[in-house]
Amino acid sequence: MLAGSLYIAPAAEAEAADQTEYEIYPTPHVMTYEDGDYIIRDEVNVVYESGIDEATKDRLNETLALKSDISVEESDSIVDGMTNILVGIDGSGEYVDNYVDENIEVTTEGLFDELDSYVLDSGDGVITVLGADTDASFYGLTSLYHIIKQMDSYTIRNFHIEDWADVASRGFIEGYYGNPWSTEDRINLMTWGGYYKLNSYFYAPKNDPKHNSNWRQLYTDEEIETLIKPLADAGNASKCRFVYALHTFMNNAVRFDTEEHYQEDLAIVQAKFEQVIEAGVRQVAILADDAANVGADNYIKFLNDMTDWLAEMGKKYPDLKQTLPFCTVEYMYNGQSYYQQFPENVQIVMTGGRIWGEVSNSFTETFTNTAGRGPYMWINWPCTDNSKNHLIMGGYSTFLHPGVDPAKIQGIVLNPMQQSEPSKVAIFGNACYSWNIWETEEEADLAWNNSFKYVDHNSAIETEGSNALRELSKHMMNQNMDSRVTALQESVDLAPMLTAFKDKLNSNTVTAEDVDALIAEFEVLQDAADIYEAQAGDTNVRDQIIYWLDCWDDTTDAAIAYLNGVKAVINGDTTAILQYNTAGKTAFDSSKTHALWYLDHYEYAEVGVQHIVPFIQAAADYVSKYAETAMNPDAVIQSFITNRTDSPNGSTDNVFDGDDSTMASYRNPVWIYTGDYVGVMYNRVISISDIRFLLGTGKNHFEASKLQYTVDGSEWLDLELTGMDNAFTGVRDQYLEVVVGTENLPDDFQAMGIRLVATADNQLDA
């Protein structure tokens, strides 16, 4: 192999470098390490082939700038006495292409037939990048960027990478209904996405009338200069390109009633696209979703004409993408046979068999069998249109299934949250997945675990700030949705501790040690919120989630206060019970006041809604009973009880207000299982003369249930009734009303609690 003379690393440094394995996301398909290492000199010679564009050169310059005091020269061949970096294109017949043929073994058969494929080789002072085209070389240099960024010296190992993308189009779409992103938000996301080999920002915002409602009108010169051109430039620089979409079928749609009308409208579509292409846009798309169906033949005709036009435009703009994403009117279904007649360059945009679909083998195989090609997946995750007061900070393997056949997918874009910066957690997952589809849930979990350092500061090196963001995100995944979307589970590790603690509260067996263990858990979360607010690597992320950080401050204050209140109950410290009950209520109330703007109104940030908030409510009920008793020893205090761990819609106070029109509704999950219960607990044994439960109409009740009572708060017994059976059947579309009168109860009946318990799994979701 041709190479110049080398510096030799000191033995200790060389040994350490030999043991280093670099972390690169997306994970390369093939990466091997060779013996030895070398030091990158302060003088670097770069050889660029003629087909390498400026954006690719800029990536290398940015990479070398990570190490200070490196000077760069360009030449047409390797120079002795310098570190040499070669960047070329396979099949060019130029210097780098020939160098690889003669000096570097490529083991992957047909490597350069794969999507966006490249070789990155580091060997004895020569770093070589050979891509299938200049974009692929950019991706190879991006891998080098991540390697050099995590090196704590100038010593680099000898290694070899052969890599490619599983999916052609990889990115995100601005298609949600919340506050539109700013131009700066969009530019920041494209720039960041380019570090993870994303290549598509699909532009479909709700606030640009010239994208949809007024699509026929051209942009003004000012709009081109301040909106379109900055986005196109950022996309071209990062290779995460600005894909400009027009919705030509919803408002004043393209006409097919006469050929004359059709040709007039086709010319308007093409003129609009030509305007943005002249401004730098290098890929366009067309939407027909949520509009009237104009018929299969008309769609086919239109797409054929647009394909021919793109080919003509490509003669003037050689870097214009010829692929044409098209979102069909049947986007939420499983595909139509007429799609087989679409031109080959058309990528058919689908949401996965339902609106909140997933990338799965079942859908992609079904669609491919029907349409004759794989779908371009529009995944409505981590979109929060139906969960506006939450952040969705996880869900990798739920929405991006392991082991899906990449040959049956043409694209994957995620529809994120109105908060662009925290959406990077999910977008990072798509970057990893669409480049190299993970085979196991463990791979997905590892990518999620590692994502926060790249979201926080674009580096493989963890910081206290990125670890804190990950800790908080474990408890921010709730989607507040029904059975139309697969539920995400949050607080997975903490939830069993919270459930066990609540069970001990109900049975009055909780100990001070139990309290201390949970206080320690909430102190971890409290510290994480403080650390992230103070040490965020990217303040743009922090500033967009500040409402949730403030909510965390109050939520953890409330949890810790109520836990100290429980300890005060254990210790019989009346003064402390009152003090901590007041502190807990003040903090918990404050946690519900952190307002964020959503289009035309305020929403209020929520965290930990699946397990933490219900736990705090249970602890509050427990402590407040003792606080009220301390103030009024003769008081009878009632508390709502249930084994449901989700937060209800509506207050549980509605259960006891005597108004049948108010309610508390538990919805996540929507299923009811044997042993689920609702009821009331008192702070002492009381005399009970009658009982009434009212559960919802429709399917929103127990299908089969019975009454139980307790006299000690821990042991539950079936209630023996006179003149009626202790078995109650819910009827669909009717309320379930359970009424037990004095005559039905045992004589002088007393209890500390009453509950209605499901005796069978519901056959219908509630």
Image (cartoon, helix red, strand yellow):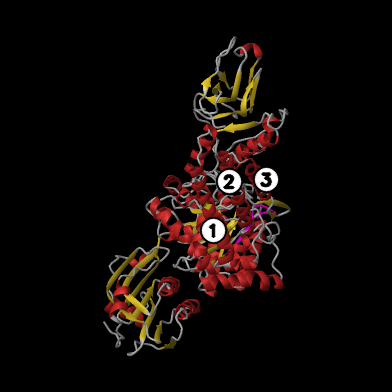
Q: Which residue is mark 2?
A: 564
Q: Crowding at label 1, few (<14), some or many (≥20) Cα neighbours within 10 Å?
A: many
Q: Crowding at label 3, few (<14), some or many (≥20) Cα neighbours within 10 Å?
A: many
* Element on which disc 1 rests: helix
Q: Amino acid at mark 3?
A: Thr
Q: Which mark is residue 528?
A: 1
Q: Which mark is residue 582?
A: 3
Q: Is residue 628 above or below residue 259?
A: above
Q: Which mark is residue 335?
A: none
Res 490 visible? no
Q: Amino acid at mark 1?
A: Ala
Q: Is residue 336 above or below residue 682?
A: below
Left or right for 554, reference 460: right
Front residue (pair 716, 645)? 716
Q: Nearer the viewer, mark 2 or mark 1?
A: 2
Left or right for 757, reference 102: right
Picture coordinates of residue 631, whole percent (x, y): 70, 36
* Range of magenta residues: 243-255
Report if the CB atoms under discs 1 and 3 are less than 8 Å apart: no
